[in-house]
Amino acid sequence: MTSALPQLQSAFGWIYFFAWSATFWPQVLLILRRRTTAGLSTDFVTINIVGFISYAIFTFSSYAVPAVSSSYVAATGYPPQVELADVLFAAHGAVMCSVLVAQLFLFPPRIAPRRYVAASALVAQALVLLGLALALRGRLDWYRYLSGAGAVKVVASLVKHFPQVWLNRERGSTVGWSFTMVLLDVVGGSFSVAQQAVKAVRMGSWAPFTANLAKTFLAAESLVFDFWFILQHTVFYADHTDIDLAPFKPVAEDEHAADAADEHVELVSRRGNWV
């Protein structure tokens, strides 16, 4: 059994990578199908992109920068517990978050994030990039810097869900928020924890959890919020009628009806009371 642990650790790592990476696509495709971002919190997307850019910096530096390993060993006694799957997931996440930001501009209702959310996001991102510049020039210890960058991701992942939970509550609906994404997130979070557990057994240490706190808390908090989103979708707001596009279903075949649908979505965008 012990001899199979390395293969099990690798398998769990790639399962969580593909599941978590796939979580971005259902939301992007849902927006393309509905031609509106109604139901998706702008604050969620704004906070999420800051978190993933920070996490991409965290994972890539931990995996590829030689000076990081010695800094981690000096501080914790162990090298960084970052896998290639972590690096690829973070990079893919940063790219897909950028796609969602673009969709917020391209499709109605085009609601801007709250000012304090946007300002906080800009400050956090600026600090992460400034810290990176200082670490690369040897003016900031890598362990201290990456601990901070990882903390930004953890805080962003925790805070980002509250606007979406509240938006679902305000609308009394989860339509526009991809439930497939939530289910994939459950799979990704579960196998992320499982991979760290297998690695901890192999090492005889809690280091896989404690030396990569960003990954540990990312999985834990995502599972907690996923459970709440599942309750919202299946129990609290079980009516999944598309409240944004319902007046135009079935879709008419002529161009005039299509234009009317576009006008309806634009009218809805002017209400500006969903986020």
Image: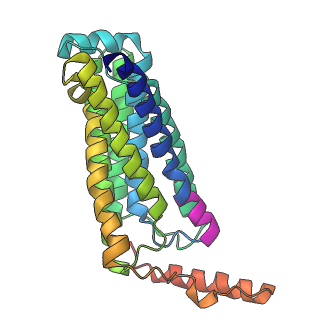
* Residue 176 part of the magenta segment: no
Looking at the image, which is closer to me, 114 or 78?
A: 78
Q: Which of 144 and 137 lies nearest the eye of the viewer?
A: 144
Horizontally, residue 116 falls left or right of residue 7, namely left
Q: Does residue 178 appear to the left or right of 147 in the view shown?
A: right
The correct choice, above or below, for 16 with respect to 71 in the image is below
**Which residue is rendered at x = 30% and y = 70% of the image?**
166
What is the x, y in percent for residue 226? Answer: 33, 58
Where residue 196 sits, quadrant-wise, is top left
**Is 270 situated above or below 68?**
below
Q: Is residue 32 magenta?
A: yes
In this rendering, the count of numbered labels is 0
**Residue at the outermost right position:** 254
Q: Quadrant of residue 39?
A: bottom left
Q: What span is colored magenta in the figure?
A: 27-34
Question: From the viewer's perspective, is 135 left or right of 211?
Answer: right
Main SS of the magenta part reads helix
